[in-house]
């Protein structure tokens, strides 16, 4: 599988609160941050984590390129044909770039997650899929999922936990 | 193409989780735009739409959802 990911703001804001946030780099060699996403990050906490990630080479800025911008706009239009939440530009840009380059999209946005079942080629992972991968690799135990919930105030539906065998 | 059944059921469960875990006293005390945005998120789970209604930064809005006990995207 690809060892590179591209993250949207909803994932970064969520994951940055987790004390084990740097475990993300046990799963992905590089996490790309698109320019439109970087503009959505505001808090010192999240920005400093991203800055440290960039300084260490675990994260990198992904430029806004005309071909992916065009594809992102097309994906936004396509998303409006389905009776589910619609994509917005930052996550559409992530999906456009990931589809072409084989990255995994990291997003907590429901529209982005649903897109992989309906019209997008890119795989989309939420925090829970990353945690499941870390469990599978033996990097954390199942109890860490509850720590994640406590630290980020992110409550996972039981059905998600069961589907991933957590 | 359609959404897998498990995902449709997951979305229903997520809505129930948001409704059930909401701190309604906190939500009732929010300014009108923010309160409306939180209610939209609880019912639809649509972060982008709710964020637009909130009129705050995305991070501030997610923090509000955390405080309201409804951060189940």
Image: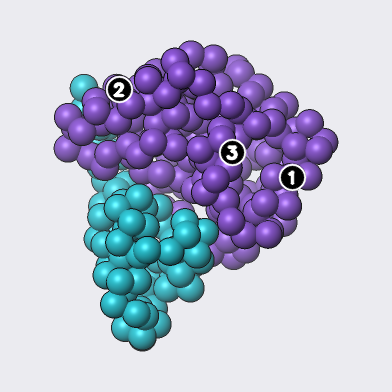
Chain colours: A purple, B cyan
The residue sitting at 48% across, 73% down in the picture is B67
Circle 2 residue: A74
Between the residue at mark 1 and the residue at mark 3, the CA separation in whole angstroms equals 21 Å
The residue sitting at 26% across, 42% down in the picture is A85
Callout 2 secondary element: helix
Residues at discs 3 and 2 both on one chain: yes
Callout 3 secondary element: helix
Numbered tag placed on residue A130 in the rendering? 3
Callout 1 secondary element: helix
Residues at discs 1 and 2 both on one chain: yes
Which of pointers 1 and 3 indicates the residue nearer the eye? 1
- Along the polypeptide, which appears first: circle 3 or circle 2? 2
The residue marked by circle 3 belongs to what chain? A
Between the residue at mark 3 and the residue at mark 2, the CA separation in whole angstroms equals 28 Å
The residue marked by circle 1 belongs to what chain? A
- Along the polypeptide, which appears first: circle 1 or circle 2? 1
Residue A89 position in % (x across, y down): 39, 36
Between the residue at mark 1 and the residue at mark 2, the CA separation in whole angstroms equals 31 Å
Few, some or many residues within 10 Å of mark 2 (<14, 14–19, 20+) = few
Q: Nearer the viewer, residue A65 or B11?
A: A65
Quick check: A75 above or below A135? above
Residue A4 position in % (x across, y down): 63, 24
Task: Give residue B32's quadrant in the image.
Answer: bottom left
Specify the quadrant that holds the N terminus of chain A: top right
Tags 1 and 3 touching, CB below 8 Å = no
Quick check: A67 above or below B26? above
Q: Is residue A25 left or right of residue A157?
A: right
Circle 1 residue: A51
Q: Is residue B37 left or right of residue A52?
A: left
Quick check: A33 above or below A15? above
């Amino acid at each position: 599988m690809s060892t590179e990911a591209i993250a949207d703001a909803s994932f970064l804001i969520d994951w940055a609160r987790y004390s084990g946030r740097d475990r993300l780099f046990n799963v992905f060699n590089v996490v790309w941050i698109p320019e439109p996403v970087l503009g959505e990050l505001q808090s010192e906490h999240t920005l400093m984590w991203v800055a440290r990630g960039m300084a260490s080479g675990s994260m990198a800025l992904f430029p806004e390129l005309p071909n992916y911008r065009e594809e992102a706009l097309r994906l936004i239009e396509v998303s409006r044909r389905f009776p589910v939440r619609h994509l917005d530009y930052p996550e559409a840009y992530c999906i456009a770039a990931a589809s072409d380059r084989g990255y995994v999209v990291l997003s907590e946005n429901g529209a982005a997650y649903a897109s992989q079942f309906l019209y997008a080629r890119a795989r989309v992972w939420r925090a829970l899929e990353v945690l499941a991968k870390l469990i599978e690799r033996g990097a954390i135990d199942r109890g860490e999922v509850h720590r994640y919930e406590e630290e980020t105030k992110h409550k996972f539906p039981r059905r998600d936990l069961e589907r991933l065998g957590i | 193409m359609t959404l897998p059944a498990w995902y449709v059921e997951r979305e229903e469960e997520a809505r129930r989780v948001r409704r059930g875990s909401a701190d309604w006293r906190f939500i009732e005390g929010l300014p009108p735009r923010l309160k409306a945005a939180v209610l939209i998120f609880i019912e639809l789970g649509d972060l982008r739409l709710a964020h637009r209604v909130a009129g705050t930064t995305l991070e501030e809005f997610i923090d509000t959802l955390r405080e309201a006990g409804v951060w189940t995207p």
